[in-house]
Amino acid sequence: MKIACGTDIIEIDRIKESIDKLGDKFINRIFTKKEIDYCESKQKQKYQHYAARFAAKEAAFKALSWKIENKYNVLWTDFEVTVNQQGRPSINIYRMDLSDIENIDISISHCKAYAVANVTVLGR
């Protein structure tokens, strides 16, 4: 059994600046349509939600790095953060063989200035 963990923290202003400067080019490179729709629905707090998803993708990449042979073959949109009706986050991972993964758990949080995410992977 293998347990792997990834953590990331990011300043919300960095994400806001990237979105303000690069617009859709940045957003569409990093986030899926579902993520964009979710974040945009948060109106004034959308940057916190974008940043939280960015941190979650980084944390997932770190937790799964032992499975990634070439990091340049992985797209940001291969990782997609969703939430259920109770607001509990989960992460969908595309274009990666997860047959040896038993569970992936994710926790994200944000405040006015920072977003943080932790991803734990249980593998065989």
Image (cartoon, rainbow, N blue to C red):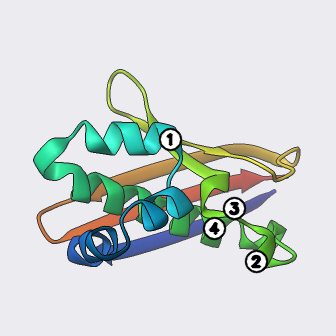
Badge 3 density bin: few <14, some 14–19, many ≥20, Cα 10 Å: few
Q: What's the residue type where badge 1 is placed? A: Lys
In the rendered structure, the answer to whether residue 115 lies left or right of residue 91 reads left
Mark 3 residue type: Ile
Which residue carries the number 1 mark?
33
Instruction: Tell me the distance, in whole angstroms, between the alpha carbons under discs 4 and 3.
Output: 14 Å
2 and 3 marks in contact (CB < 8 Å): no
Nearer-N-terminus badge (2/4): 4
| Residue at (80, 70) in percent of width and height | 73
Does 70 appear above or below 87? below
Q: Amino acid at mark 4?
A: Phe
Do labels 4 and 1 touch, CB within 8 Å? no
Q: Report if the CB atoms under discs 2 and 4 are less than 8 Å apart.
A: yes
Q: Which is closer to the viewer, label 3 or label 1? A: 1
Q: Residue at x 47, y 65 (%)?
A: 25
Residue occupied by mark 2:
71
Residue with the mark numbered 3: 3
The residue located at (68%, 64%) in the rendering is 75
Of the residues tagged 4 and 3, which is closer to the observer? 4
- Label 1's element? helix
Image position of 9 (left or right of 102): left
